Structures are given as structure tokens and as C-alpha cells.
Image (cartoon, grey):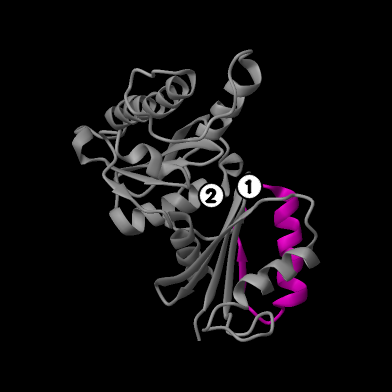
């Protein structure tokens, strides 16, 4: 069994693979203050409930793959793998790790690990050219060429960040539930804000993806657009450009990178 861990700014997503199949997954809050020991206890509690794993930490785990956008959490997870999974082949995505995807950026080291891992999975599952739209703390748009190269992207404020900003900066506004309003024209303040968020972000996705696709391919229709991230389902029904929805894209990419960096016996 392969344990994959995707540490985002807000949430950490964990997935358990049996071969190529994801058989279990969990989502927890990302807390930069958690120590390695606290993380180990948390992992033990989650995985101890799975019938394919033993009761002791590490039972049934024969590989670990981790990517993190929060350096302090990556440091603690490195310690977890050393102290509690010492005999398990672990891959932490950082400079020097083989991904199979060339990074055509001014400074490849500054590209978030999760964005590269998403590109790895996109190339494997759909080929290129492709655009990955990841709805997380930020909404990121990542472009993959027809030759499977990571060529760049776009970073925009995420949905939850925008909702929080409206609540903080608007004198008569407040934080709202992320839900579909009854109509585009809101009949009250909450519905008006919900409409602005939902249809505003759908319009943003369509506009940004359209412009990227025209730069990425001679025929924009050749570009496959893949949505992922925890908030993707909110926008899927309103965007006109998304072709595929793969909620576990990053975890699949981690599985692929683990396979490419750990020698099989």
C-alpha cells in the first residue's frame, strides 16, 4: 500500500493506494504548528480504521510520497518518515526528484510542488496539451505542452480567500456559505454575494482558460482542461471549458512520481 500526502496551505489530503487504485482518502486541516509526533498520532488514528492495514503505525505501508506547499510541515513530515517509517521507501517532492516533466520556467525551483505533480498526472492521464485548474487556497491554472512540458501558469485568489476578503473589508457584508443561489440576480445580500462568487469564478475560469488555450495550441479545441481541488465541484456546472474532473489528480501524480524514483525489486 502506498500512502500519498498532499499538504496545501489550508487542507492536507491523504490517499491510500493499492496498486493504481485509490482505496481510501482523508482530508484534514493544515496546521504548521503540528510536530512530527502529533502528525504520527494523527496518521495512526486515521489509518488504524482501515481494514487493509494493521493496528501498528506503518503496518501494510510499503511506500510514501509527499508534496507540500508549507515548508514547516514538510520538515515535520520528513521527521515522521525517518522516525516512524524508517524502513519504508519515501519520496518527498523537492528539487532533484525525477518527475518526467520538463519545467520550462525562468526559475523552475520556485514552482509549487503540487503544480508540478498535477502536471505529471495530467500528462499520464490525458496527454498534452492540457490545462489543470486547481481550486484550492489559490486558484491555479497550469499549462502543459503537447510534448508534456510544464510551460507556466496563472495564479489567482481562491474562492475562500475572496469570500473572507468580502466579509472583512465590506462594512455591511459577512462571511457566507458557499452555495448556489436561487438565481443570478440575488434577492438579498447573501444571495448576491453567492452569485458573485459562483458566476464570477466560473467566468474567470472560462476567460483565463480561453486565453491560455490560444497561446498553448494552434487549435484551442485540442487542449484538455482538467479541474481538481476541493472547491472544483462548486464551479463545474457553470464553467463551459472544463473537460474532465479528477479530484485525486495530485495524489495520482504522487503515485507516479514515487514509481519513477523508487527502484522496484
* Magenta-highlighted residues: 70-95
Q: Is residue 87 left or right of residue 145?
A: right
Picture quadrant where residue 247 is located: bottom left
Q: Secondary structure at mark 2?
A: helix
The residue wearing badge 1 is 69
Q: Which residue is depicted at the point 48% across and 45% down? A: 103
Image position, residue 246 (x, y; %):
37, 53
Q: Which residue is depicted at the point 39% across and 40% down? A: 234
Above or below — where is 59 with respect to 36? Answer: below
Q: Earlier in the sequence, mark 2 or mark 1?
A: 1
The residue wearing badge 2 is 114
Residue 138 visible to the viewer: yes
CA separation in Å, label 2 and label 1: 7 Å
Q: Secondary structure at mark 1?
A: loop
Residue 101 visible to the viewer: no
Q: Is residue 245 left or right of residue 109?
A: left
Q: Is residue 157 magenta?
A: no
Query: Number of callouts in the render?
Result: 2
Above or below — where is 36 with respect to 10? Answer: below
Image position, residue 42 (x, y; %):
70, 67
Q: Which residue is depicted at the point 48% across and 35% down? A: 178
Binning the other alpha carbons within 10 Å of mark 2 as few (below 14), some (14 to 19) or many (20 upward) gives many
Amino acid at each position: 500500500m502506498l500512502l500519498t500526502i498532499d499538504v496545501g496551505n489550508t487542507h492536507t489530503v491523504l490517499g491510500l493506494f493499492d496498486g493504481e487504485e485509490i482505496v481510501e482518502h482523508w482530508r484534514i486541516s493544515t496546521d504548521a504548528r503540528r510536530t512530527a509526533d502529533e502528525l504520527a498520532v494523527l496518521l495512526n488514528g486515521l489509518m488504524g480504521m482501515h481494514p487493509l492495514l494493521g493496528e501498528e503505525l506503518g503496518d501494510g505501508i510499503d511506500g510514501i510520497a509527499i508534496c507540500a506547499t508549507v515548508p514547516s510541515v514538510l520538515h515535520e513530515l520528513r521527521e515522521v518518515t525517518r522516525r516512524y517509517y524508517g524502513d519504508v521507501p519515501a519520496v518527498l517532492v523537492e528539487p532533484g526528484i525525477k518527475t518526467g516533466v520538463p519545467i520550462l520556467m525562468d526559475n523552475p525551483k520556485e514552482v509549487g510542488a503540487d503544480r508540478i505533480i498535477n502536471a505529471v498526472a495530467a500528462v499520464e492521464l490525458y496527454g498534452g496539451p492540457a490545462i489543470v485548474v486547481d481550486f484550492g487556497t489559490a486558484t491555479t491554472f497550469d499549462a502543459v505542452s503537447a510534448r508534456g512540458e510544464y510551460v507556466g501558469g496563472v495564479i489567482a485568489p481562491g474562492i475562500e480567500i475572496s469570500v473572507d476578503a468580502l466579509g472583512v473589508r465590506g462594512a455591511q457584508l459577512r462571511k457566507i456559505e458557499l452555495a448556489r443561489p436561487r438565481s443570478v440576480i440575488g434577492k438579498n445580500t447573501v444571495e448576491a454575494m453567492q452569485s458573485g462568487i459562483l458566476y464570477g469564478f466560473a467566468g474567470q475560469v472560462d476567460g483565463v482558460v480561453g486565453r491560455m488555450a490560444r497561446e498553448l495550441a494552434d487549435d484551442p479545441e485540442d487542449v484538455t482542461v482538467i479541474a481538481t481541488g476541493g472547491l472544483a465541484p462548486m464551479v463545474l456546472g457553470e464553467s463551459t471549458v472544463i473537460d474532465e474532473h479528477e479530484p485525486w489528480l495530485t495524489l495520482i501524480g504522487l503515485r507516479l512520481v514515487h514509481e519513477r524514483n523508487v527502484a522496484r525489486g
